[in-house]
Amino acid sequence: MATLRDVAVAAGVSPATASRALSAPDTVSTARRHRVIEAAERLGYQPNRSAQALASGQSGHVGLVLPDLANPSFAAIAKGVQAQARGSRNSVLIADTDEDARAEREIVRDLQANVDGLVLCSPRMPEEQIRECAAAGPLVLVNREVEGLPSVTFDSAAGVTQALQHLRALGHRHVAYVGGPTSSWSDAHRRRALGSVDGVEVTDVGSHRPVHQGGVAAADLALETGATAVLCYNDLIALGVMSRLRARGVTVPDDISVVGFDDIGAASYVSPMLTTVAIPLTRAGHEATTMLEQLRSDGTDGHPVRLPVELVVRESTSPHASTAPLT
Amino acid sequence: MATLRDVAVAAGVSPATASRALSAPDTVSTARRHRVIEAAERLGYQPNRSAQALASGQSGHVGLVLPDLANPSFAAIAKGVQAQARGSRNSVLIADTDEDARAEREIVRDLQANVDGLVLCSPRMPEEQIRECAAAGPLVLVNREVEGLPSVTFDSAAGVTQALQHLRALGHRHVAYVGGPTSSWSDAHRRRALGSVDGVEVTDVGSHRPVHQGGVAAADLALETGATAVLCYNDLIALGVMSRLRARGVTVPDDISVVGFDDIGAASYVSPMLTTVAIPLTRAGHEATTMLEQLRSDGTDGHPVRLPVELVVRESTSPHASTAPLT
DNA sequence: GAAACACTTGAATGCGCTTTCATCACGTCG
DNA sequence: CGACGTGATGAAAGCGCATTCAAGTGTTTC
């Protein structure tokens, strides 16, 4: 593998000049720059990142920590981070904590020592630990806010409001809310908006695991409240709720309307297609990475960014007490 | 940030000994080793990976290249790679090629210069280019075979056979096959098994994009063949087929049975739940990474591994001409 | 009791690159 | 015409670590 020194020799310049020609082109005379670039291409020169990192103190890596890669939502964020990072010629080191809070702290510490910055997506890490991490290096939070730290979140309170308004417009007056993990920032954030719409009473049916099975279990509770619509912490839960309702002979949306959160792919694959609040996951990845880069260059404290969400109305919601099937 | 030198000073030993105490513990006397380890912990020492990489020639990174992180199947593979890599104290550099074949070659080259080995998941890269990559460094293929190169694939031909046998057992004699991208290895591999079950005639209805919409489009073609069951290249297509069938008033599984491939989450969330061939994606990630590590240590040529698949029978398949609804 | 050996240790070297710093060649200005 | 900035260049000094090599210590063997 060709080294920078080889390139320099081939171009008849010093290694210093070769280095400059490649990484700070305008500090080198045009003629030499061309000679160097040509030589680099001819030799198939690929800079050694480790050496660059060691010498410059910049690894060229951005770290990404998330709870579960197999979860489509997190994967979407990863995609955004990845795309944006490549755009600025960085690569991304990914760490799946496997929902293991214990290991998480260590993983972050490990990663943080070897990246230029970290995108942290950790719904459950204690706030105090997050602050520790932030002190150890540039870091931006995704889908979570901590006072004073840069973050990109979703305005899901607005999403809740939109969903509630939509349901009210359809004549619903009583809605059940199937919550997610109590310890999660976003659940707390959503709950705060539950009372935001006049004329709609919301009954909280408690916290549930944000998976299909969680929704299955919650469906009966929701039914018991007598609500005519149910708003769920996420689509997986909503899908579970719908499964269970169907199994109990309750028709969606005729008997009861269901609204989810996230707009995962499956929301459009089921029947009835799920009405849900779409959140710009991939964009959040972009945004977070951009913010990280600014953090490192400007040194400015990144201010929290809250991305807009959008209610996507499909088939799982219909007017209350309607007798006509949707299809 | 504490360096190894700091640790050495704190422990009263030379940097060389400190280095050994940490990375080759049994070459250092017990007493000193403890002193070093204690000092390292006290100072919060974190080795500088770049320096280690530069000095040892081993980056401690494994590269992972895949077409689309947002695709749950690839994300599952990534999860496996990640888990296995962490187990051996490696980290994974991830690159999403965004289905862009053009960029792919360059991305791989870039990555390959800076990792110890590469897990490559590229259904469409020309075989010749793959060989080039393999020549440039340790590499294992996932979900694709190239003569002479290490790979981990799925025995999806066996999956096709299982599915066909299942359908025959239910009385189906005529099955439509909705194919995936022609250029993909796995589609070719599956097609070869289409004639493997006596008594079942398979009509190929052509290649389709491996997405929901692709299935929607294919459903009408499948129906036209008069087949009583349809086997799909993947679950996304199968889900699309089911959507379209429902829209046309055809009931699954009473009028027609549907089988998918992959067992993505959504397969269990829809109604009827999809009968599908489950493939061990995450395990493939494990396996590939393990193979990569062996490649590097033993230097042995890894032989191709073909992982078993399993037909998961759910609700989308039922006896032909049955008049009783499944539920 | 000396020679041979195994085992630990530290000094020194270099991985490939970036980044001062000093040098040199030019053009500019007083 | 000399003093002085300006921009381009190369020599050299590390970045933090692994690793080679020689030296030192203690143990075994004949």
Image (cartoon, coloured by chain):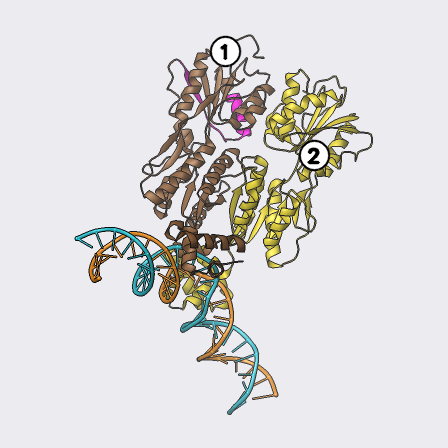
Chain colours: A yellow, B brown, C orange, D cyan
Residue B201 part of the magenta segment: yes
Residue B129 part of the magenta segment: no
Q: In which quarter of the image is the N terminus of chain B?
A: bottom right
Regarding residue B53, the answer to whether it shows in the image is no
Residue A76 left/right relative to A21: right
Residue A47 percent location from the top left of the image: 43, 57
Write the residue at 64% across / 43% down.
A126
In this view, the residue farthest toward the top is: B323
Q: Is residue C20 above or below residue A110?
A: below
Residue B128 percent location from the top left of the image: 35, 42
Q: Do the residues labelled 1 and 2 touch (CB within 8 Å)?
A: no
Identified by mark 2, the residue type is Leu
Query: In this view of the protein, which residue sits in the foreground, B8 or A69?
Result: B8
The chain letter under disc 2 is: A
Q: Residue B33 carries which label?
A: none
How far, Cα to Cα, is label 1 from label 2?
Answer: 41 Å
Q: Name the residue carrying label 1.
A: B319
The chain letter under disc 1 is: B
Residue A226 percent location from the top left of the image: 76, 21
What SS does tag 2 mark?
strand
Write the residue at 70% across / 22% down.
A221
Q: Name the residue carrying label 2.
A: A311
Q: In this view, does B119 lie above or below B38?
A: above
**Residue span colored magenta:** B199-221
Residue A206 percent location from the top left of the image: 70, 29
What SS does tag 1 mark?
loop
Residue B240 left/right relative to D29: right
Total count of labels: 2
Identified by mark 1, the residue type is Pro
